[in-house]
Amino acid sequence: MVCDGTSPQKIMLTCIYAACKAEENHVSAEELGKGIGQDHHVILNNEMLVFQSLGFDLIVYAPYHTLDGFISDLEEFCGAKDDDQIVALKASLETARMEADKIMRTNGPLLFPPGQLALAALHRANTEHGIFDFERYLRSVLSRHHPAHTISELTASINAIDSLE
């Protein structure tokens, strides 16, 4: 990490800055630089180097697009042909999006893939609306793919996500 001529002191300051952010005790780079007599641009310029060296991924994938796909799939699964069924599924989607918002404020996005987060949100929404047999739908989804997980593992993940609030 330091082989490019960057001094360990500058990297250490950047690590302190990043650690403050990670612990939700954010101190601005300007404030940190001023407090120790260092140009804040040095801290900011090394931030990505530190994250890359740690193998840290700053992208967190959300379940919203997956939810849309599940709702489209549910239209077929439920045989939704009339307007009432489609309206009920759309209402369920809105509830599922609100549930996904709640899930996104937990550690869930760091622990589970977006598909499982979407299924957990859909499960919560279906508990409220009761439109379809959720377990039968899970079996249907798993039967069409080559799943990496069994139905019991997937159910355990959904239950774990539900308990995160």
Image (tube, rainbow, N blue to C red):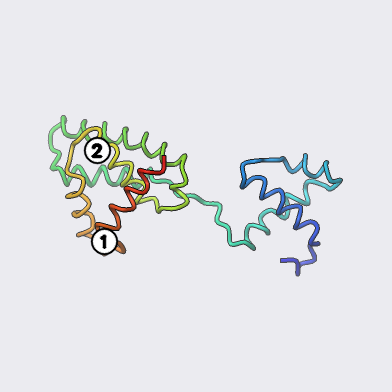
Say which residue appears at 72% left-offset and 40% top-offset.
28
Q: In this view, does 4 lie above or below 11?
A: below
Dot 2 falls on a residue whose secondary structure is helix
CA neighbours of label 1 inside 10 A, class few (<14), some (14 to 19), many (20+) = few
Say which residue appears at 81% left-offset and 62% top-offset.
7
Say which residue appears at 21% left-offset and 32% top-offset.
88
CA neighbours of label 2 inside 10 A, class few (<14), some (14 to 19), many (20+) = some
Quarter occupied by the N terminus: bottom right
Quarter occupied by the C terminus: top left
Dot 1 falls on a residue whose secondary structure is loop
The kind of residue tagged 1 is Thr
Please give the label number shown on residue 104: none
Among all residues in the image, which is located at the extreme right? 37
Say which residue appears at 43% left-offset and 47% top-offset.
108
Residue closer to the observer: 49 or 125: 125
Please give the label number shown on residue 126: 2
Q: Which of marks 2 and 1 is nearer the N terminus?
A: 2
Tell me residue 135's x, y (percent). Answer: 20, 49
Residue identifier under label 1:
150
Q: Quadrant of residue 33?
A: top right
Q: In which quarter of the image is residue 164?
A: top left
Q: Is residue 67 above or below residue 111?
A: above
- Check if mark 2's residue and mark 1's residue have beta carbons within 8 Å: no
Q: In this view, does 151 lie to the left or right of 51?
A: left
